[in-house]
Amino acid sequence: MTVVGAARRHGSVVVVDLRGRGQAEAVAAFTAALNGLEELGMRVRDNGPDDRFGTDRPDDTPRAVAIDSADRLTANHEVYRAIFRSRRVGSMIVVAVGAPADRSAGRALSATPMVGGEGTPVLWVGDPDGVAWRPGGGVREPGSVQVDRVPPFERLIEALCVPDVFDRVVAEVRRLPSGACSPGLLTVAWEVDADAVRGALRRALHAVAGPASPDGGAGAGLSLEGGHDVLQGDGDLVPVGYEPVGRDSVLARTGGIVAELRRNADRTVRRTSGLLGLVAPGRSGAAVRGQLADAGRAVTRCQENVAALFRQFHSRTAPGTHQRADLTRHGVLWTPPAEVDRAAAAKRLAQAVEDRIGRRPLRDLAADLRLVSERAVPSGSAAYVGGLSTTGATTLAERLSRPPAFPLRPSNGFVLAAVAVSVLFASTGPGIVGIALGVATASAWLGGVLLVRARIPVPSVPPRAWHRALAAHAGVAGVGVAAGRGVAAVVAVSLPVACVVWFGALTVLLLTLRQWWSRAVREWSGRLGLDDLADVGDRIDGLVRRVAATEWVLADVRVFLAEAAATLAGALRDVADAMERRIAQPSTSDDHALPRQREPVESDAGGDLRAVVTADVTDAVREVLVPRLQVVRDGGVDGVRPGAAEDMTRVLDDYDRHLATRNIHERPWFAGSGSRADTAMIGAWGSRRRFAATVTVHGTDRLVQLCTAEDLLLLQGTDRPATVRFAPRSAQRLLADIEDPAGPEGIVWTASGYLAGAIRLVPLRAGAVELVWPKGEGDATL
């Protein structure tokens, strides 16, 4: 049987079983094992840097574990001599399996100087099943201490395949005078069946890639934050304080002009209120209506000028040189804010995608990017012409050009009653004076009514209705005069009193006229609705600012963002497609798999296998996409999409080889230092107490000694046998809070991720190894 240990970062170990082989066959087996290891190293180096898989560099010399029969060490002297003369093996451990050569004589092994002593260390395994033994104590069945279901001899060989453990064992055994010892063992392991790994890989690929959709799926968009949503056409997020248009330019003043026109129109309406507004010259209804119409036409011209500019400089790409020059004359400033320039946009986009790798399926992320691309493409300034109406400018122009009817009722009952009473009191004077005062008062009122009619901007009733109203006012006034004269005939009123009463009646009529007119003006102003359009100027300025920023100044940045987002979306889809094809096709890892001593058994401890594999797949995606995202960060798009699928396929091929040679216990070369699910890796060891007890065991504790109870007599008594403790670096956190967990010898932290435990090295008694000198030299070579 030939077993090749997996290649490691600090060296490689080959394991060759010499039992049952002749010398030539044994030498051939060693040659094949070394050639296979070198072939693997060459294949890995051809696929990338020398240490992508943690393999040896060309100048590394492998280690070797030779499994031999205890009674064949001298017979295979020529094999060992050929191995060392080839200089293809740096160091070797011989594992001698079998009963002692002569138990009664206290002799366990017979060996040549090349094996044992100052030569190659020897581990004597008198019984592969062993016994549970503590120095100075009795023996028990091995199952009483070893919870690992794999036979201890197989675990010993697997532990020796870990280069760091191999080197520590060699160093400890070479300290012994005889160079030979009996190994004891206690291990805990986390092994995962290859089928389970492949299943987890398929699920991880599907989860990271996302389900395929015929139409590409509907994206939810991608917020770039930091003010960058303005690049997706969201003008409401134009950076505060950024002015894309000069303050003194025509474009910048348009909103102010419209706002001033509205204010002037509002003042014109308000000035018509009250007696002063009624009697002031130049404020006829026609004049007021003309002023409002002029303001409406001015608002329309401002709106049309802005719309003409929007149409003139419409483009769905970045403005050309001539357009930029013309827009500059109109006041456009071409310096974008630093937070949304091309460099910042490129960095934000790349960072947003990188942050979501592994958190969002690739196909969904691609759909998000596609939506970003669609939103980022400039709409063109002409697309905002219709938006001018939403600013209220169109409504303002229409209200000023066609104001509502003036809501004054010519025949107001309250007014007519007030007129009748006022004229009555004015007519109560003595004789002809009373008649004159009554007629004068009635005439004054009718003059006021005629003035009101002349001041109405937009009549609400036809002229005939006013004729009837005038007749009603005249009739009421006449009735008042007649009634006043009737009162004067009954009640004598002196002239002074009559004058006072007349003045009071005239005051009441003036107040009635004022109230009648002002109330109608207020109602008309409300119907005109100028107060509702108080922010029309700000809205126009906001729209102009938005168009200038998003469609002109930032157009080139938006075009780049759209192209970069679309290109990245394509690259993500290509990567997802490559992952989907990998799910559909059978694994190719068998082509790269190294021979194993045995098939993995069911996991000895639970663990979130899928979390670990998903983290690796996510890192594989990052390995492909991060260099492409760097291209985008640097402001380019060329080279982002080409080869993405092929690169993903190559990385997945590498991961297949990694899983075949190392399962999931070591990080693949593309895995980030903090990205893997370390918590799941630690949890896979099961009981933390059991793990700590196994790794921190002392040489005087009960371990499985690989010999029979009778063979214990051939071991040298010692109160502190050498013990090599080892554990994967990924499990260091399990021992973080244990005081002095490893004793003075320390723990060998290994790259191998599935095996932990301790190897106790008990030296053989003096004379237990018989030194036999070879009779002659052979010609066996490697």
Image (spheres, grey):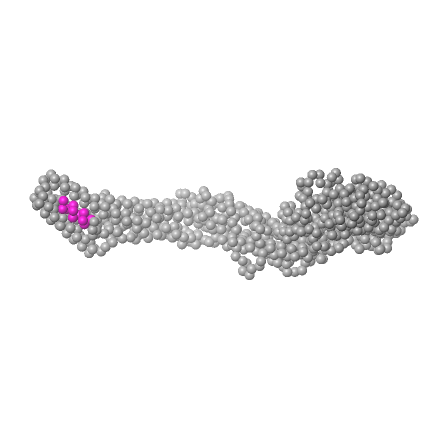
> How many numbered marks have been drawn onto this rendered protein structure?
0
Q: Residue at x 54, y 53 (%)?
A: 369
Can you say which quadrant of the picture contains the N terminus? bottom right
Q: Residue at x 63, y 46 (%)?
A: 674
Expressed as whole percent of the image width and height from the top left, the position of residue 516 reads 23, 47
Front residue of this view, candidates 138 and 499: 138
Expressed as whole percent of the image width and height from the top left, the position of residue 314 reads 44, 53
Kindly tell me whether residue 707 is visible in this rendering: yes
Kindly tell me whether residue 85 is visible in this rendering: no
Q: Is residue 178 left or right of residue 376?
A: right
Q: Residue at x 80, y 51 (%)?
A: 128
Expressed as whole percent of the image width and height from the top left, the position of residue 167 reads 77, 44
Q: Which residues are magenta?
A: 415-425
Front residue of this view, candidates 646 and 534: 534
* Residue 200 forms part of the magenta stretch: no
Front residue of this view, candidates 202 and 575: 202
Expressed as whole percent of the image width and height from the top left, the position of residue 646 reads 63, 56
Q: Residue at x 48, y 48 (%)?
A: 230
* Residue 421 forms part of the magenta stretch: yes
Q: Is residue 523 left or right of residue 227?
A: left
Front residue of this view, candidates 691 and 671: 691
Main SS category, magenta section:
helix
Residue 174 falls in which quadrant of the image? top right
Q: Is residue 329 left or right of residue 217?
A: left
Q: Is residue 713 left or right of residue 334?
A: right
Residue 744 falls in which quadrant of the image? top right
